[in-house]
Amino acid sequence: MQDPCDHWLVYDLMSALPAEVEGRLLMGLTRREAEQLAAQANASFVRQPSRSPVRHPSFA
């Protein structure tokens, strides 16, 4: 996700907040950094044991 200042952030859909890795918020990144960190986060999420579904709010 790109902010108005041309910086990028990785957004966590499960928490509806910017993603965090080892206490670091993934904000103020270059596009390349954001893409790499998002890919790493997605890969680690897939490798984790099965999770129960998380309900997301509906929008009308």
Image (tube, helix red, strand yellow):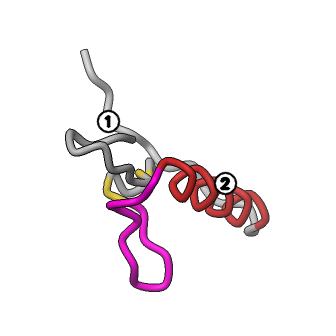
Q: Is residue 60 left or right of residue 19?
A: left
Q: In this view, does 4 lie to the left or right of 8?
A: left
Q: Residue 49 occupies which quadrant of the picture? A: bottom right
Q: Give the residue type that dot 1 points to.
A: Pro
Decide: is 14 above or below 2.
below
Q: Please report the bounds of the magenta region as a residue range.
A: 19-30
Q: How far apart, in angstroms, are the residues tagged by discs 1 and 2?
A: 25 Å
Q: Is residue 33 left or right of residue 30?
A: right
* Badge 1 or badge 2: first in the primary sequence: 2
User: Could you say whether the residue bearing mark 1 is in a helix, strand or loop?
Assistant: loop
58 part of magenta stretch: no
Residue 6: image location, x then y, percent: 30, 43
Residue farthest bottom in this picture = 22
Residue at mark 2: 39
Decide: is 15 above or below 4.
below
Residue at mark 1: 57
Q: Residue 57 occupies which quadrant of the picture? A: top left
Give me the residue at 44% from left, 47% from top.
Answer: 13
Quadrant into which the N terminus falls: top left
Pick whichever, 42 or 15, lies toward us. 42
Residue 20: image location, x then y, percent: 42, 71
Label 2: few (<14), some or many (≥20) within 10 Å? few
26 part of magenta stretch: yes
**Viewer-nearest of discs 1 and 2:** 2
User: Could you say whether the residue bearing mark 2 is in a helix, strand or loop?
Assistant: helix
Q: Give the residue type that dot 2 points to.
A: Ala
Count of marks overlaid on the render = 2
Q: Is residue 32 left or right of residue 28?
A: right
